[in-house]
Image (cartoon, rainbow, N blue to C red):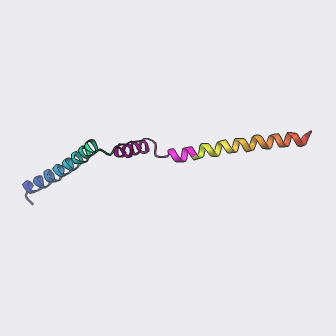
Amino acid sequence: MDTDNVLLIVCGVLTFVVLLNAGLVFSLLRGRNRDRFRVLGKTIEVVQNPWRKQDEQFDELRRRIVELEEQELEDHADESR
């Protein structure tokens, strides 16, 4: 296989990827629909903390457990009197 053909194919693929990415960026910047930026912002948030929803659910579970333990202690103290 000729190295010129391989080099030509690699350059073609790289050019395609660069043009595709540039097209996506320009369409986001030029578009009148600002919801696209919200989608991009949400995507960045997910990339920064992919387990955010699970962390929030664990925090809620932890809060409820603490409330139940406090209620159980109060009930136990009332029974002791």
Which residue lies at the image location 27% right of the left edge and 41% below the top edge? 29
Q: Nearer the viewer, residue 62 or 35?
A: 35
Residue 57 is situated, as x and y percent measured from the top left of the image, at: 58, 47
Image check: 50 left or right of 28? right
Tally of numbered tags: 0
Is 75 covered by the magenta stretch?
Answer: no
What x and y, as percent, mark residue 20? 22, 50
* Left or right relative to 57: residue 42: left
The N terminus appears in which quarter of the rendering?
bottom left
Is residue 20 or residue 62 the one in the foreground? 20
| The residue stretch that appears in magenta | 34-56
Predominant secondary structure in magenta?
helix
Report the residue that reaches farthest toward the right: 81
Q: In the image shown, does 9 or 80 lie closer to the viewer?
A: 80
Q: Relative to residue 11, is residue 45 drawn left or right? A: right
- Residue 44 part of the magenta segment: yes
User: Percent from the top left, x then y, of residue 73?
Assistant: 80, 41
Q: Residue at x 24, y 47 (%)?
A: 21
Q: Residue at x 25, y 43 (%)?
A: 30
Name the residue at 11% across, 52% down. Answer: 7
